Amino acid sequence: MKLKIKNGLLITALGMAMTAGLTGCGDKETATTGSDTSAAPVSTEAVTTAPAITLQDEILNFVGKDLPGIAAERDEAVALYNSYFADGSDKNSEKWMSTLSDQALPKYDSYLTKLKALSLVNPEMEELKKLYVESADLQRAAIEDVINAIKNADTSLLDYAQNKVNESKAKLGEYEEKLKTMCTANNIVLQGNVVPVAPDKGQEINTESQLDPTQIEQLENEQAEMDQ
């Protein structure tokens, strides 16, 4: 069954106030003038403004357009993070730390700025976005912990990083469950774990590139071996 998206744009009619024109009379013998000005009473009606977009449409826009539209810098940042663990990596932690600090974090920060700036109309969408932002913030903090762990040769910071990655995944899980509930309530039929954002086109519910907590454990073991 294909989803039919209803147009959620509402047009509100505005009333126009009408005023009476000025009237004047003149005495041609004395050449003096007089005027009488009056204005018709203006009636104003309270206008109730409905949301400019339906919740259904806003869900589809958020998942299918807004998030994918800003994802490039986040994905680049996560790819730089994952490069250390890729096959053939030279495992140079100092070089990797510089890459994370100089490239990955600025890209991720730019992504977060765009994510937090996304404008939403419906309060439920703001709550959904809040979960997504919290997940992303935790992931960003984990990357910074990894940088500081290498810089200060402090493996305890890697434990903090791992905890934050796990918290980020949990928060993203809350986002996914809330999104599924909202989809069901707004007649959006999920195709597995995919939101049908357009005919013959879908978007995965989980659109957040996630750090792997097992990678941090691997890094912790490597750092411990170097300290011996």
Image: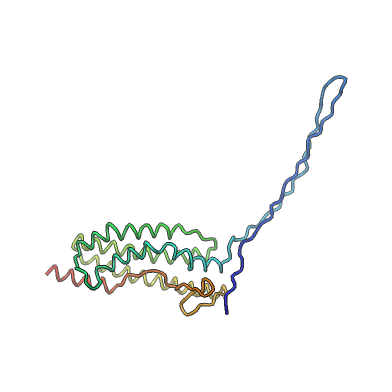
Horizontal relation, residue 177 to residue 44: left or right: left
Which residue is rendered at x = 69% and y = 52% of the image? 14
Quarter the C terminus occupies: bottom left
Q: Residue furthest top?
A: 30
- Count the labels in the image: 0
Position of residue 35 measured from the top left corner of the image (x, y, whole percent) = 80, 30
As drawn, 28 above or below 121: above
Q: Is residue 33 above or below residue 168?
A: above
State the colouring used for the structure image: rainbow
- Does residue 19 appear to the left or right of 47 in the view shown? right
Residue furthest to the left: 228
Residue at 57% of width from left, 77% of height from top?
Answer: 2
Question: Where does the image place residue 161, in percent across and percent down from the top left?
Answer: 28, 67
- The outermost residue toward the front is 200
Q: Which residue is located at x 27 percent, y 68 percent?
A: 83
- In the orientation shown, which residue stands out farthest toward the right? 29
Q: Nearer the viewer, residue 88 or 26?
A: 88
Q: Nearer the viewer, residue 16 or 103?
A: 103
Residue 145 position within the rendered picture, expressed as x and y whole percent measured from the top left:
27, 63
Q: The N terminus appears in which quarter of the rendering? A: bottom right
Where in the figure is residue 90, as x and y percent of width and height?
Answer: 19, 68
Q: Residue at x 56, y 69 (%)?
A: 56
Between 131 and 62, the residue placed more toward the observer is 62
Q: Nearer the viewer, residue 125 or 205?
A: 205
The quadrant in which residue 73 appears is bottom left
